[in-house]
Image: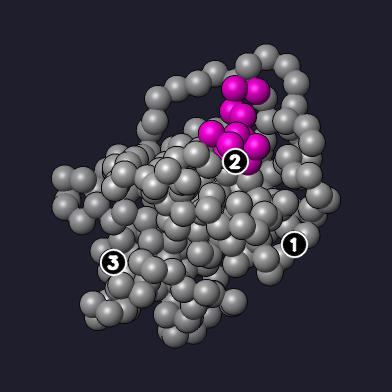
Amino acid sequence: MSDGEGAAYPTRRREAFFGRVMGKTLRPRQAELFDTLLPSLALDLSRPAPERLETLFPQPVEAVRLEIGFGGGEHLLSMADRFPRTGFIGAEAFRNGIAKLLVDLEEAPRPNLRLHPDDATLLLDWLPPASLAGVDLFYPDPWPKRRHWKRRFVSPVNLDRLARAIRPGGLFRFASDIDTYVDWTLRACRDHAAFAWTARRASDWHRPFEGWPGTRYEAKALREGRRPAYLTFLRS
């Protein structure tokens, strides 16, 4: 498994993660896994990215996908299980979510899964151009107050990052239960030359993605009467 060679990648401060990085105190087992398991799964951004991301995985994979903000890892794990020939990178800065996923991975390792436990923009800037088959962004923090909208992950600069990292023909998938964020994302992608919404029927944006396992955040939204939207954009 090769992470590349050469000069160290320049580091910078977090840019797109404004929420908490820590919730309730981790259980001893969870905290231990940050020292014992996470180092073997975390990407080393202090080194240049390999020309082919497939070499980041200990087993052969044919393509690489990224999930930004994987929460507790429900969807990420289901995808890794369904598509063993695809490599998956999960980016998450919230330590409690990372801890939950690490417990699952200790019990059932997935050799086609790597992690980035920090701000996803750092990872996107590290990746080689056109290196991803797709990017998933599900239930990101909506930052509902107008003065905080600039903190939303979907923005012109981050869409530029996604357009750079996703290969032509790849997909950017977005899900949210917050109407204003759905509208925000539709407008932002409409105004970006690299992305085209794939919906063909009025019902498409309320139809879950194929094989969608649901998430705990989605379950809460449904209990509270909010209808999720599922958007898919093609990288042109």
Residue assigned mark 1: 84
In front of the other: label 1 or label 3? Answer: 1
Badge 3 marks a residue whose secondary structure is loop
Lateral position of residue 131 relative to residue 193, left or right: right
Q: Which residues are magenta?
A: 35-47
Q: Are marks 1 and 3 in contact (CB under 8 Å)?
A: no
Q: Quadrant of the image for the N terminus?
A: top right
Nearest to the observer: residue 8 or residue 152: 8
The reply to whether the magenta stretch includes residue 71 is no
Q: Quadrant of residue 77?
A: bottom right
Instruction: Return the x and y of residue 144 as percentages of the image width and height.
Output: 20, 56
Q: Is residue 210 above or below residue 189?
A: below
Mark 3 or mark 2: whose residue is earlier in sequence: 2
Res 55 seen here: yes
Residue positioned 29% across, 47% down in the render: 24
- Type of amino acid at the residue the image marks with label 1: Pro
Alpha-carbon neighbours of circle 1 within 10 Å: few (<14), some, or many (≥20)?
some
Residue assigned mark 3: 178
- Type of amino acid at the residue the image marks with label 3: Ile
Q: Which mark is residue 37?
A: 2
Q: Quadrant of the image for the C terminus?
A: bottom right
- Type of amino acid at the residue the image marks with label 2: Leu
Instruction: Return the x and y of residue 235 as percentages of the image width and height.
Output: 60, 56
Measured Cα–Cα span from mark 1 to mark 3? 32 Å
Instruction: Return the x and y of residue 101 as percentages of the image width and height.
Output: 51, 54
Q: Are marks 2 and 1 in contact (CB under 8 Å)?
A: no
